[in-house]
Image (cartoon, rainbow, N blue to C red):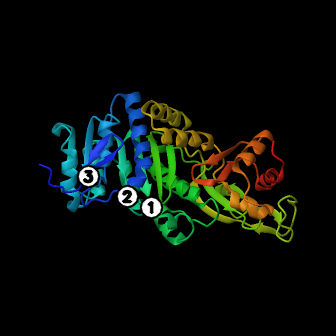
Amino acid sequence: MNSFSDAPAWERSVQFQVGNAFYRPQSRMVRDLGVLAAAVYRQHTGRLRVLDAMAGCGVRSLRYWLESGADWLWVNDSNPEVSAVRLHNLSQLPVNRFKLTCQDANQVFFECYGQQDFYDLVDVDSFGTPAPYLSTSLWSVKIGGLLYLTSTDGRSVTGSTPDRGLAAFGAYARSHPAAHEQGLRILIGSVQQLAAAKGLGIVPVFSLFAGESYRVMVRLVPKVLLNTNSYGFLGYCHTCGDYQTIAWNKLGRTDCPHDRHNPDPHNLNPHSPDRTPLSISGPLWLGNLHDVEQLTAMKNLAEQWGWTNCVSLLAMMQTEASLPPYFYTLREIGRRGKLDLPNRSHLIQTLQSWGYAASPTHINPQAIKTTAPLSTCLEAAHSPAL
């Protein structure tokens, strides 16, 4: 008998009760992408065992079961006050296909490792920083499996509280226009380093900035992938507005080539004796934000299911995946170019016609990612329409 007085909620094909659990309908896209990635994994491997370590009311677990085709679920949450609603929601599943526990997530991860019970997908939807769970969660993931992480502590990775970011992720964050992408890259970089310490590696499947949360799905692989090309530093010049990636062996020997007394980005002087030091963030992940092959499979599935908003998001992710680890906002381009807010489509088309890669970015709808320097973006903004 249903003891909950509220009308049931729906999310995609799943009906459930929220009860006294925290549930944010606006985060459906986050769950959509997790379900799509899990379904693609099952299509490729023929199996899907899911550990939902911080399950709340259980809506994610239900969707992994009903939409992704999970064979087995371990549904855990440390809050005993939401156990009743979680049990009610999971009661619609066969009793021999899931396990329901109320433990600290780290206890669960250690139990997985102790019993050599590894999972194809581990979802860690933490509130605030995920730092206490980054290393331990890796112990519960099967080699080749997926780890889906959440961070809602944006201040520590965007420069507002850099000491807190240093403590949580071993990275120092500075403030600049592309700081939200920086947040995703600090999270990926931290997991990459922790995996390398275990003799393993991770490959980003996709990275999502969703308003107030940073969501990253990575694949655990048996080879260490940490190197100075993919894990380094990002430098930003507050004077001219341009970025540089900085390798470890270049720290202390990198600055902006413009003359601080003549900061015109159109007239750079690489031999100026009075160059501007950069504001440096890191270490962080400098490689691709997404795996294009995986995004293609997820997009194809989203098209089959009629999830049109996912299709458009995944298409944008595909175009931005391999572009540099920063973006330029239209506001900055307009301010520095002394013009109104430039048209994003015009900028992208012009830069592409000049031989540069350029794309919108899902992280900021008023920004572009491109291989062109900011000075070229300013020229493109001033150029006539094609």
Horizontal relation, residue 334 to residue 152: left or right: right
**Three-letter amino acid code at the position of disc 2:** Ser
Which quadrant holds residue 261?
A: bottom right
Contact (Cβ within 8 Å) of mark 1 with mark 2 = yes
Dot 3 crowding, Cα within 10 Å, few <14, some 14–19, many 20+? many
Instruction: Label 1, secondary structure: give it.
Output: loop
**Looking at the rendered structure, which numbered label has been put on residue 8?**
none
**Looking at the rendered structure, which numbered label has been put on residue 152?**
1
Q: Sequence order check: which comes first, mark 1 or mark 3?
A: 3
Q: Residue 101: image x %, image y %?
A: 21, 52
Q: Residue 136: image x %, image y %?
A: 36, 54
Whole-Å distance between the Cαs marked 1 and 3?
Answer: 20 Å
Whole-Å distance between the Cαs marked 1 and 2?
Answer: 8 Å
Q: Please identify the quadrant where the C terminus is shown.
A: top right
Contact (Cβ within 8 Å) of mark 3 with mark 2 = no
**Looking at the rendered structure, which numbered label has been put on residue 76?**
3
Instruction: Label 3, secondary structure: give it.
Output: strand
What residue is rendered at 26% in x and 38% in y?
72
Whole-Å distance between the Cαs marked 3 and 2?
Answer: 12 Å
What residue is rendered at 39% in x and 38% in y?
38
Which quadrant holds residue 65?
A: top left
**Three-letter amino acid code at the position of disc 1:** Thr
Q: Is residue 101 visible?
A: no
Above/below status of 220 relative to 104: above
Q: Residue 18: image x %, image y %?
A: 27, 55
Relative to the observer, which residue lies in front, 203 or 63?
63
Horizontal relation, residue 31 to residue 237: left or right: left
Dot 2 corresponds to which residue?
Answer: 126
Dot 2 crowding, Cα within 10 Å, few <14, some 14–19, many 20+? some
What residue is rendered at 32% in x and 34% in y?
69
Q: Sequence order check: which comes first, mark 1 or mark 2?
A: 2
**Three-letter amino acid code at the position of disc 3:** Asn
